[in-house]
Amino acid sequence: MSELSARGFSVDEYQQRLARTQRAMAAQGIDALLLTTEADIRYYSGFLTQFWQSPARPWFLVLPAAGKPVAVIPGIGELCMRRTWIEDIRCWSSPDPHDDGVSLLIDTLRECLGEAGRLGLQMGAETSLRMPLASYEAVRAGLARTSVVDATSIVQAQQQVKSAAEIARITFACQAVSRAFDRLPEIAAAGDSERTIFQRFKHECLDQGVDDVCYLVGATAADGYRDIISPPSDRIVAQGDVLILDTGCTHDGYFCDFDRNFAFGKVDQATSDAYSRVHESIDAALDLARPGVTCAQLYQCMQSVLATKTDTTDSGNVGRMGHGLGMQLTETPSITHFDQTEMQPGMVMTLEPGMAYGDGRIMVHEENIVITDDGCQLLTQRAAAKIPLI
Amino acid sequence: MSELSARGFSVDEYQQRLARTQRAMAAQGIDALLLTTEADIRYYSGFLTQFWQSPARPWFLVLPAAGKPVAVIPGIGELCMRRTWIEDIRCWSSPDPHDDGVSLLIDTLRECLGEAGRLGLQMGAETSLRMPLASYEAVRAGLARTSVVDATSIVQAQQQVKSAAEIARITFACQAVSRAFDRLPEIAAAGDSERTIFQRFKHECLDQGVDDVCYLVGATAADGYRDIISPPSDRIVAQGDVLILDTGCTHDGYFCDFDRNFAFGKVDQATSDAYSRVHESIDAALDLARPGVTCAQLYQCMQSVLATKTDTTDSGNVGRMGHGLGMQLTETPSITHFDQTEMQPGMVMTLEPGMAYGDGRIMVHEENIVITDDGCQLLTQRAAAKIPLI
């Protein structure tokens, strides 16, 4: 599976994504769904480009109640979109200071909505509207008799369950990065700067076959780190330091997201114990994860391993112990005490328990799994049971 | 300048950014500015992390009419934010399904706005609101007597003019990538796949010292390309192909953004002529660019070189011939026929003329410049006057 090199998805796959979404739209009486973000537009169209790095232009995909999606996009994207399965591609010359796609979008939506239809929009947690707010208000004014309803759950529920082809892509990224982490003791040493180690690791991930190293954060610190989302500094790594690297690399637009911890030369007992504890909590989650188990149950399962009467434990302010994973570094659902989402076959999740120990230090572990018919399967190479020494 | 290794900015620099912005706020009677995007929050705080890759959590920075910015952020970011010059950091445990920062943000804004103040928000072109729409509506409802005004131009105008420290970072990225492009003939050959060439180029950019290769698009095609925003394919490059690589790499959070064209073994006359034409159009823009010249004048200047009576010329649907550059791959202003923004010393711009030729082929060139007191200065190593053969 790690040798996969196929790119793109079959038209059949897009048809299935669309059909399931349209059934959910019908159940809620939604006449059209407006999508504005990179991930959502790519999910239903296959439109894959890093051009989204530029905030200059808005892009739209409209899912009607029946029939194929309609793209309403800047002309610069037309040829790239024409390579997808989308046929109805409506372009304007962007940027346009007077009407940057607004009237074309209104016209397109009106075709789907009629005079007083229901427009679905992602408005809930973990979403945002990627278009100027003033343009959104102009679209709303142009569709005065349209009611807007929150379609967050429709799109998120659809995207949570991955196809075999999607899982293969995530697996490829997970395996490539696992091999890169295996090589870390050969490319990092006390005396190197954090920045040097991060850069060598990026090279290694590319060498192992990922397309891009989109996300690499971490830290080094004597006897344990306190912050896990920062970029590298010029700090020189010393004996006794603990290193965490947390990375999201992509293959064909799909992410892995996991971390690894290492200690240089020696490790203090508290750190070693914390490492083992979070490692055990993932073992417990791997045993539990199967269809029907909820995110909240996975959270409680990991938390129960981390917490004992004599410990000060919290999750290091991470706020959750894992999340969905796919076209984005983090997706729904969240492994929290309150998320009642049930696992289903095909869901790809991170297990990411974290605990505080000692004087404000934290220890975070992360693995990626897919839910199977009767359990779960690791997509990453399982981290060592004891913290590796470099 | 290319050896710069300093990271971060002085507190003095942030104070100046804030002071200028607060003066502009005062002129428009704005009592508080709400910022939600990575670039805007980083610009005023120095908060630099790739954690923004995760869409799970909203982040807020509030600029009051007087005094320092206030951060309203998920707890996971607290330590990273504490390393910046921001002192008032208010955190909540995110994700929270019932109140994901909304009430904390309302309370913070109310301190700045009183009962009926004016809240500035970026609503115009090239902006978006990075928070769930439902949360935004809840904030609006919680500040019922607050009027919301569009502050797009305040923030964009402030960010358009770069400090010496910002220019140094962009220069570093431009010079590193210029060196990587110089090496391209050594790392790309007919017989390689597009994907192989792209990956080798990423390695090369990292080797030359950039932090990340955030953006790399391009194409190869016999006798010239038609699309410039797509990812690489498995296509094998052949003699007579034209290659364009367009990249945005970062140094300390600042981008370069430029492209280079190459031909493998031989080049047809039409492509060679088109290359020379766009190259000349940049020469003309380099001669013209100085304080007081408008974007529209730069556009007309480049367009006049590209267009002759016997040519079919358009801009390949790019819609503009350059743009601002800095913390984002593309920033305002846009070099279009309608943008009347005047150049000022310290503005960093891309010059990016494109023309269609032959049967739908396009040729796009790009250089990065900074406007000086009496002209402009290239930040990139100028492309060869004739298309390089590999």
Image (tube, coloured by chain):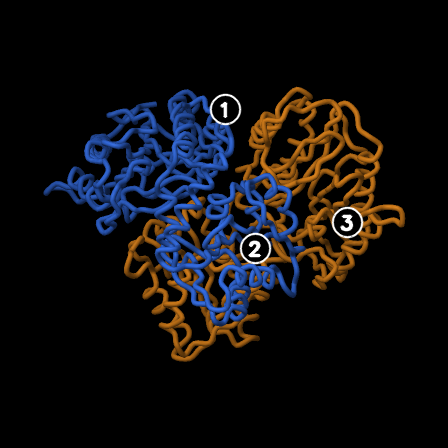
Chain colours: A blue, B orange
Residue B157 appears anywhere in the view: yes
Instruction: Name the kind of residue labelled 3 in the image.
Output: Asp
* Residue A30 in picture, x, y percent from top left: 41, 59
| Disc on the earlier residue, 2 or 1 | 2
> Depth-wise, is mark 3 or mark 1 nearer the camera?
3
Mark sitting on residue A207 = 1
Q: CA distance from mark 2 to mark 1?
A: 34 Å
* Residue B152 in picture, x, y percent from top left: 56, 65
Q: Residue furthest right?
A: B309
Residue B19 appears anywhere in the view: no
The C terminus of chain B - image quarter: top right
Q: CA distance from mark 3 to mark 2?
A: 22 Å
Q: Residue at x 28, y 49 (%)?
A: A319
Kind of element beneath mark 1: helix
Kindly indicate whether the residue at mark 1 contacts the one at mark 3 (C-beta within 8 angstroms).
no
Residue A288 quadrant: top left
